[in-house]
Image (cartoon, rainbow, N blue to C red):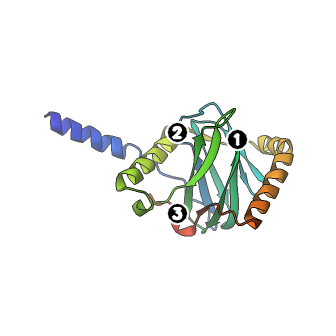
Amino acid sequence: MKKILILFFTIVSITGYSQELRKPSEGKSIVYFVRTSGTGFLINFKYFDGEKYLGKFNCGKYLVYECEPGKHVFWSRSENTDFINAELDAGKIYIIDSEPKMGVIKAAVALVPFSPYPGSYKTPKKFEKKKAAILKSISETKEYVATDEDLKEGAVEYESIIKSSIEKYNKLTAKGEVFLKLLPYMSYTN
């Protein structure tokens, strides 16, 4: 009986996070920005698509961003700035995990694209653990939705940060810096 109960709770815990992800509108792509780690939980990370401010949130929330397919430079700002080069297909869903890292004054951020292929991880167990953490963070937390006013205020407030960060990205790219990529085949499927 004990083995049956353990098996039942294991199945429930694995399937308990079968969150249905939002589907993109016709001809659009969706990118989920999630935070699966509670480290630095009070620190807001700010999110951008090139020069466009998307919002800021701390642990316990996630952002759903619907956008045009094609090339994007997604980036996040905390104590540092981290970039991802993305190429998105229409009709697809992508996930980026915002991993907090130890900073000098506050948590730094590392953007990590989720690859739905187990072979992209060191072991199948690490893949399943990451996938479960992402789905748990979506199903157990609240979606962050910025108002138009929040987005306008943020664009003005972070105007100099946006300018300097885009300049930094361009300089690093010109020097041959390679950033993580979010490629079309890395779309998430339920």
For badge 3, the amino acid type reads Ser
Cα separation between marks 1 and 3 = 26 Å
Q: Which residue is mark 3?
A: 187
Mark with earlier residue (1, 3): 1
For badge 2, the amino acid type reads Ser
Against 178, residue 106 (above or below) is above
**Quarter of the rendering containing residue 31:** bottom right
- Relative horizontal placement of residue 55, taking residue 99 as reference (left or right): right
Q: Residue at x 56, y 58 (%)?
A: 94
Q: Are marks 2 and 1 in contact (CB under 8 Å)?
A: no
Cα separation between marks 2 and 3 = 22 Å
| SS category of the residue bearing label 2 | loop
Q: Nearer the viewer, mark 2 or mark 3?
A: 2
For badge 1, the amino acid type reads Ser
Q: Which mark is residue 78?
A: 1
Q: Residue at x 69, y 48 (%)?
A: 76
Q: Which residue is mark 2?
A: 37
| SS category of the residue bearing label 3 | loop
Cα separation between marks 2 and 1 = 15 Å
